[in-house]
Image (tube, grey):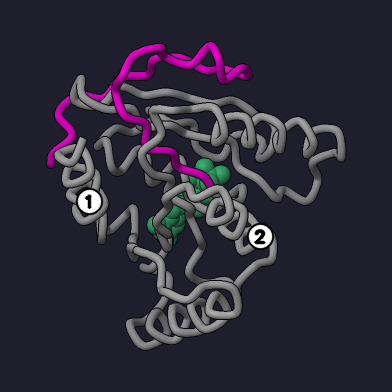
């Protein structure tokens, strides 16, 4: 699938106000600075559809984009920013939890992980929570251009070894680089396949 049309629809702090139609949602989420906005822009081939590097943790909104008049790309707020206040963290949690619990149109989440880092508790806990709620997700490893092929392999092995403490299978995953456009086609093809199953 090529994205030939992408447009911003609406930002919300209230899940019930998200677009009220039957188009499927694909939600992108991850720690602040993981490269989520950059990835969304690269997927859509636009320079600034999603806002990159705004004050991390500040914008706590559910952003809906309409893709090819056919599905929603949902940009969820970044989590885990150290300087976020406790109140903001709670607000974020509430918003995310209500999105995942209430949004019937959600087909799959994409949890973004910076491939350079060791497994972080906040990501592992979040994926465990998705699993508990039986919400489908894939992992998108970002910034692979920053590592050698050998190091990428090592990082992935380490990641899934850690995940095997809690998971009996290796989750579906993609290895991406936004500037090099690596792995982006695979993400879009995967979404296309899921859309066909609808
Ligand atoms: P967000 O907070 O998750 O939306 O992160 P951003 O998209 O704003 O990216 C954070 C920083 O990482 C920015 O400086 C980006 O240029 C950089 N970045 C994002 N994706 C990549 C990538 O795939 N490769 C490299 N080398 N840098 C990236």
Which residues are the magenta region? 1-29
Q: Secondary structure at mark 2?
A: helix
Count of marks placed on residues: 2
Tell me if residue 106 comes above or below residue 153 in the rendering: above
Side (left or right) of 38 relative to 76: left
Q: Residue at x 38, y 68 (%)?
A: 144
Q: Which mark is residue 125?
A: 2
Q: Secondary structure at mark 1?
A: helix
Side (left or right) of 106 relative to 198: right
Where does label 1 land, which residue?
190
Q: Quadrant of residue 109?
A: top left
Cβ at disc 2 under 8 Å from ligand 1: no
Judge by depth and name the residue closer to the eye, 110 or 129: 129
Tell me if residue 40 comes above or below residue 147 in the rendering: above
Tell me if residue 57 comes above or below residue 193 in the rendering: above
- The percent coordinates of residue 68 (x first, y second) are 18, 25
Q: Residue at x 36, y 68 (%)?
A: 145
- Quarter of the image for the C terminus: give it: top left
Q: Alpha carbon of mark 2 to alpha carbon of mark 1: how far?
A: 25 Å
Q: Residue at x 55, y 75 (%)?
A: 163
Q: Residues within 10 Å of mark 2 (few under 14, many from 20)?
A: few
- Quarter of the image for the N terminus: give it: top left
């Amino acid at each position: 699938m090529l994205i030939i049309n992408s447009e911003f629809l609406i930002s919300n702090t209230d899940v019930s106000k998200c677009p009220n139609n039957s188009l499927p949602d694909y939600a992108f989420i991850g720690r602040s600075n993981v490269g989520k906005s950059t990835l969304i822009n690269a997927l859509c081939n636009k320079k600034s559809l999603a806002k990159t590097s705004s004050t991390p943790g500040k914008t706590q909104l559910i952003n809906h984009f309409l893709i090819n008049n056919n599905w929603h790309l949902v940009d969820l707020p970044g989590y885990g920013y150290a300087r976020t206040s406790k109140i903001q963290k709670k607000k974020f949690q509430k918003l995310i939890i209500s999105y995942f619990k209430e949004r019937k149109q959600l087909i799959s989440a994409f949890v973004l992980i910076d491939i350079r880092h060791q497994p972080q508790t906040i990501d592992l806990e979040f994926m465990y929570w998705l699993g508990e709620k039986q919400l489908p997700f894939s992992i998108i490893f970002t910034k692979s251009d920053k590592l050698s092929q050998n190091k990428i392999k090592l990082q992935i092995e380490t990641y899934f070894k850690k995940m095997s403490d809690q998971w009996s299978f290796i989750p579906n995953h993609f290895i991406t680089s936004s500037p090099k456009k690596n792995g982006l086609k695979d993400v879009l093809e995967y979404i296309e396949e899921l859309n066909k199953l609808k």
